[in-house]
Image (cartoon, rainbow, N blue to C red):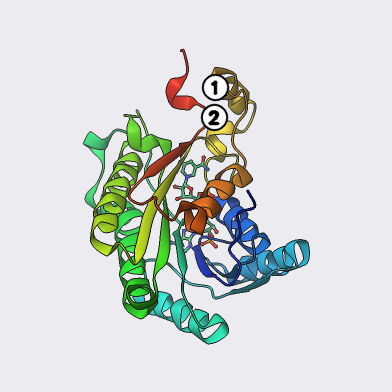
Amino acid sequence: MDIRLDGKVAIVTGGSRGIGRGIAGAMAEAGAKVMVTSRNEESCATTVAELQSSTGGDLTYVAGHIGKTEDMERVLDATMEAFGAIDILVNNAATNPYAGPVIEIDVPRWEKTFSTNLTAPLVWTQACWNRWMKEHGGAVVNVSSVGAFGTNAILGVYDITKRALVHLTEQLAAEVGPAVRVNAVCPGLVRTDFARALWEDGRGDAIAEMLPLKRLGEPEDIAQTVVFMASDAASWMTGHAVLVDGGQLVNLN
Ligand SMILES: NC(=O)c1ccc[n+]([C@@H]2O[C@H](COP(=O)([O-])OP(=O)(O)OC[C@H]3O[C@@H](n4cnc5c(N)ncnc54)[C@H](OP(=O)(O)O)[C@@H]3O)[C@@H](O)[C@H]2O)c1
């Protein structure tokens, strides 16, 4: 089956690097018009130019912080102006400002993690719903994590936000159907800057060895699932969180 997004308009937060860049490229290749956004303008510009050249697709960008409402409004205004619709929202950008036990987290970093990883996806979904999707339909894909499904010695706070994002996905899916579908993808360890500390200097090899599929993830592994979830091929699927993790949760360790 050839999964296409022809005629659709997609916004990918955190689309300049890593998994978001993979998603933006895969969506452009599938025929969507893509708005890329992240904080660093130069990196957005470079990524959009590279993806235009590698996919032949129609992409543009607006730089901004996902937690700032005025930045989000600029992204949405520019998307409507450039492409005239907002059919797909990928809430991909996230942060992890703290590594350590949850019992020791300070409130500012707890709140920052929740504001970027949970509040921002809600606010962006609300805005896309109000501006376009409520009337015209659409699909939202939230990028959660395999960490949503277990405990972790150092990533506990981040994982709590990702678990809450799965619950937000379920709750919104129940509220906004049938016009809009809301699903989540939960990546395992993917070789991006965000997760560099976990895989660089050979550390990733030991982790890969424990996985049934014997390798770490690449952004494209996640991107293909996101394209599927956003496409009409998934038109009877909403409120689900799909693990794309090389089999991490079924390993035999
Ligand atoms: N890599 C993994 O192993 C892994 C595993 C599970 C889940 N995930 C999830 O996958 C998603 C993408 O992660 P990644 O590994 O691809 O990270 P990455 O390579 O660090 O890329 C993050 C992207 O988000 C942007 N960004 C970060 N904070 C932002 C903010 N406040 N406002 C707007 N843009 C922001 C970054 O650009 P700027 O710096 O220019 O803003 C960049 O484009 C995240 O939700 C992460 O939690 C990753």
- Report whether residue 155 is seen: no
Q: Residue at x 29, y 62 (%)?
A: 177
Are discs 2 and 1 less than 8 Å apart at CB?
A: yes
Q: Nearer the viewer, residue 237 or 217?
A: 237
Residue 87 versus residue 96 in the image, above or below: below
**Position of residue 191 in the picture relative to residue 119 (left or right):** right
Query: Viewer-proximal residue, 228 or 168?
Result: 228
Label 2: which residue? 246
- Of labels 2 and 1, earlier in sequence is 1
Q: Position of residue 169 (x, y in %)?
A: 31, 52
- In the picture provided, is 129 more to the left or to the right than 23? left
For this orientation, the residue located farthest to the bottom is 81
Residue marked by disc 1: 211
Q: Secondary structure at mark 2?
A: loop
Q: Residues within 10 Å of mark 1 (few under 14, many from 20)?
A: some
Residue that appears at 63% across and 23% down: 205
Q: Name the amino acid, label 2.
A: Gly
Seen in the picture, residue 135 relative to 163 is either above or below; the reply is below
Residue at 61% x, 59% y is 4
Residue displayed at 55% across by 55% down: 20
- What is the spatial separation of the Cα atoms under label 2 and label 1, in whole angstroms? 6 Å
Q: Position of residue 171 (x, y in %)?
A: 24, 53
Residue 21, x across and y down, in percent: 60, 57
Q: Please tell me how crowded label 2 is: few (under 14), some (14-19), or many (20+) other residues with Cα within 10 Å.
A: many
Q: Amino acid at mark 1?
A: Leu
